[in-house]
Image (cartoon, grey):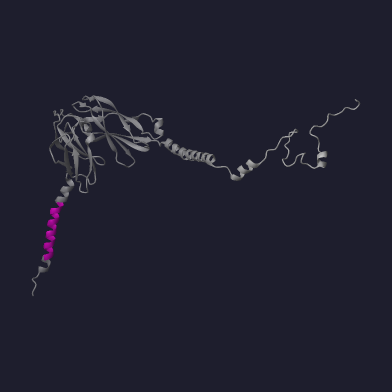
Amino acid sequence: MRRHPGSGSRVPTTLLFLLAVLLGLAAPTVQAAEDDDPSVTLSKKEAGKGGEITVRGGGWRSEALLMLLICGRSSPERGVIGGTNSCANAEGRAATTDRKGAFSKRLPVAEPPVPCPCVVHVATVTGEQALADAVFTVAGHPTAPLPPPADDGRLAVLATTRLEGESSLLTWFGAPPARQLVFTVGNLGTAPVDDPVFEIGTAHGVYAPQWEERQWRGTVAPGSRARIKLPVELSAGAHGDYQVSLRYGTKVLAEQPWGVGRPWGVTLFWVLLCLVVPAAVFRIGMAVVDKVRPPSAGTSARHAHRPRARPTSTGTAALPWFTQDSAPPDIRRSAPSANPPPPTTKGHV
């Protein structure tokens, strides 16, 4: 059969064209999956206290640890006003995303400490911060309008931060080291800032900081400044070089190094424990052995049948098998008398 010229190269060209089309369709999908923001969906939009809802999400980092809370005085646009102090922390739950960044977790319905509007707040615990909120209504819980928006993002640190305080004797024995982070902030905005919520992060070595919320009670008026002290505490037995960070909103305001000494009292305690306890156990064991050990049979029999020697007038003990009565007559005559006659004086009759 006669082959048409050029028909042999037509099939590979068609395959390459189809492959390019498929790759073009797949590339936007992969890019869209990578650019997806974290999202949260709820099985119910409203439920009463004591109920339960299912929280699902997608677009998160793979195998990320998340925190799920029901918070009041919040909205998806403005977030959680007042930080986690506005949330039902005791009834919160933790969830871990799968390799695709998705999760599903049951969350009990609880009343937050502040009025609604409420949201289900989901945020990462470690690593890069990410969060998402979903509108939720707690049936029967009070509702109040949100406070007017304040220019919260205009707080700035005006002076060098420092750590104040000293370690106590208990810290030498492993108690948690504690300090106070002292800094001065100024309000560069046009609206007052009431009860600002800061975050204190402590990082050891190359590890990411662990953030904890600290709320300062007070108001910073526009154009004014305030001196703030926030407590900082490490875990028990902590030692080495630490980095303390101060964050307000999404902006890190200051960082301060902190060198923590080793708790040598703990090492000394274990050394003494390893020396004193074995010695005490050994002495107690030897005392018990001496107390319960029976006497030797030969020694007790020898002491029981041995006759006692009778003392003589000269103060020496006589042998039990040799006395003057049992001695031979010649020895008995030569033996000195126990009661010799009194001496006589020459020249007297």
Q: Is residue 301 left or right of residue 310?
A: left
Residue 19 part of the magenta-drawn span:
yes
Residue at x 47% of width, y 39% of height = 277
Q: Above or below — where is 248 with respect to 57?
A: above
**Whole-percent x and y of residue 185?**
26, 28
Does the magenta portion include 15? yes
Residue 81 or residue 183, whichever sits in front: 81
Q: Is residue 336 left or right of residue 19?
A: right
Total marks placed: 0
Does residue 39 appear anywhere in the picture?
no
Residue 165 coordinates in the image, percent (x, y)? 36, 29
Q: Is the magenta stretch mostly helix, strand or loop?
A: helix
The magenta segment: 11-27
Residue lying at the far bottom in this picture: please name it: 1
User: Percent position (x, y) of residue 259?
Assistant: 37, 35
Choose top left, top right, bottom left or bottom right for residue 344.
top right
Give the quarter of the figure containing the C terminus. Answer: top right
The quadrant where residue 184 appears: top left
Q: x, y percentage for residue 177?
A: 36, 33
Looking at the image, residue 256 sits to the left or right of residue 14; the answer is right
Residue toward you, 222 or 197: 197
Can you see residue 88?
Answer: yes
